[in-house]
Image (tube, rainbow, N blue to C red):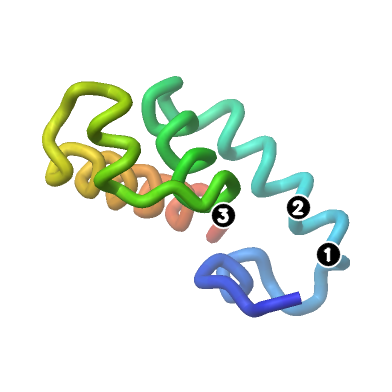
Amino acid sequence: MKNTDYDGYLGPRLSRDVQLRRLQRVMDNELTACQRETVVAYYLEKKSMRQIAEERCVNKSTVCRTIQRAERRMRRCLRY
């Protein structure tokens, strides 16, 4: 499985299952619905920022900021 930006925040000692459960919990409890939906569309559904923006009738820059804020929040939460 490919390495992600979040592996370092989840810690190398935790099993992959534990890491995924922690990530899911953070996404469910710490992200807004908009952030969560945008992250899922971008990373899991592999949609481009342009596609997401068109679907939501917003600027591409709005999608980019939403993803950046969600990533920042997830990193902060996963450090602890």
| Percent coordinates x, y for residue 77 in the rendering | 51, 48
Select label 1 or label 3 by which is in front: 1
Along the polypeptide, which appears first: circle 3 or circle 2? 2
Q: Give 52 or 61, whichever is nearer the viewer.
A: 52
The residue drawn where x is 83% and y is 55% is 18
Q: Quadrant of residue 38?
A: top left
The residue that appears at 71% across and 47% down in the rendered structure is 22
Considering only vertical position in the picture, is 12 above or below 56? below
The reply to whether discs 2 and 1 touch (Cβ–Cβ < 8 Å) is yes
**What's the distance in space between the residues labelled 1 and 3, CA to CA?**
14 Å
Q: Tell me the element at label 3.
A: helix
Question: Which residue is at a point 65% across and 48% down the rendered structure image?
Answer: 23
State the mark number for residue 16.
Answer: 1
The residue beneath circle 3 is 78
Numbered disc 2: secondary structure: helix
Q: Earlier in the sequence, mark 1 or mark 3?
A: 1
Classify 10 Å Cα crowding around label 1: few (below 14), some (14-19), many (20 and above).
Answer: few
- Is 5 in front, or is 57? 57
Amino acid residing under circle 1: Arg
